[in-house]
Image (spheres, rainbow, N blue to C red):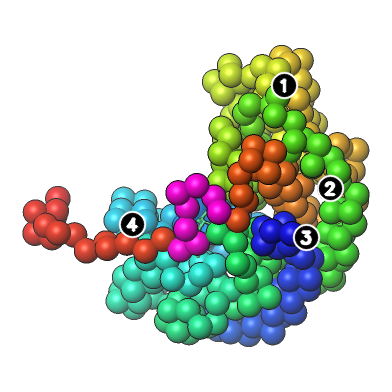
Amino acid sequence: MSHTFHEIMTQPESWRNALQEAERVLPDWRAVLGREDTLVIFTGCGSTYHLAQTAASLFRVLVGRRAVALPGGELVLYGEEWLWGIPRDGQPAVLVAISRSGSTTETIRAVEIHQASGGQVLAVTTRPDSPLAAMARAGLILPAGREESVVQTRSFSSMLVGLNAIAALLGGHSQLWRAMQRLPEAAERLIDRYLPLARSIGEDLSIQRFYFLGSGARYGLASEASLKMKELSLSPSEPFPFLEFRHGPMSTVDEATMIVGMISDRHRHHEMAVLKEMQSLGARILSIAEQDATVALDSGVPLAGRGALYLPVPQLMAAYRALARGLDPDRPRHLSAVVTLNLEDPNEERSKP
Ligand code: F1P
């Protein structure tokens, strides 16, 4: 079995480790996050930027903290354009830097800039031996999520489960924390039950384009699922918040379109309505929800703690589509496991506004 498939199939075990580590490092996070009014900036690149988007949403909802997410490259080159005016009450923000490798140039540079301004950093990575792990005072280190493959699957979901657990614990959501202990076995059941469906969709090459819809904390997950489909199968794929899809993108819907909806609980009606409308235009649809969906998660975990469960079926769809297209999931075209750059500005003087 390829690295990619092996890593997708073994995610549940890495989630057990992530839950344990989240509880162990909680005192460090409390100490670094400090005052309630301190801004928390989440950053990462590509997949880990999408993880930052979801983590920021979870911190806003579960911890009640002001939290934002930015790609590492944007934070380095345009940080003031994105963050100017966001109140920090004179407090330097805390930066949560997320990087599977712990070596991506933009993320490391963002940490250096933040620390130079007196800010504190929390590192989330699978590599204890990485530059990022060495730079941060504390964080969440998950070697069980480590991967050989280029495309992130197990690493992403284990860091997500860890960050989700930390948010639940910091916010005092003890019932949610207890329910999240069911995630690994729910994921094992989910993969067993829906692998054949994911494979049949992945092998259906009459599908020519994909859309992944997700709102709130699930928008980052829809973005990650869309990136998987792009990276692994080289297929056109885009994420949208549910209601945004009607404002233009639906013009492309036809019989060769597949739309995957990451359905919430409380706004299920409005989200399913989008899927049904697109189905009437010819699209094939796949709903993922706790119950009453094409993919029923059947986890018993409240919405705010089950985000990772929306990922395995889209990951498998993308991996099987890669094989069906004669591609090697372990060697995605043009990609490398770590992006390293020279970010020094050659004309430092001239670049000032
Ligand atoms: C991030 C990254 C991903 C990309 C690919 C390679 O690296 O560039 O964004 O999708 O999986 O790795 P990292 O900073 O998380 O190690």
- The crowd level at tag 3 (other Cα within 10 Å; few <14, some 14-19, many 20+) is some
Which part of the image, by quadrant, shows the N terminus?
bottom right
From the top left corner, tell me how far across and down residue 265 is, in percent. Answer: 81, 43
* 210 to 126, vertically: above or below: above
Q: Nearer the viewer, residue 61 or 283?
A: 283
Residue topped by disc 2: 195
* 336 to 127, vertically: above or below: above
From the top left corner, tell me how far across and down residue 271 is, in percent. Answer: 74, 32
- Identify the residue shown where x is 27% and y is 62%: 343
Name the secondary structure under disc 4.
Answer: helix
Residue topped by disc 1: 283
Could you tell me if residue 99 is visible in this image?
yes
Q: Which mark is residue 79?
A: 4
Looking at the image, is mark 1 or mark 4 earlier in the sequence? 4
Residue topped by disc 3: 9
Looking at the image, is mark 1 or mark 3 earlier in the sequence? 3
Q: Are marks 1 and 4 in contact (CB under 8 Å)?
A: no
Name the secondary structure under disc 2.
Answer: helix
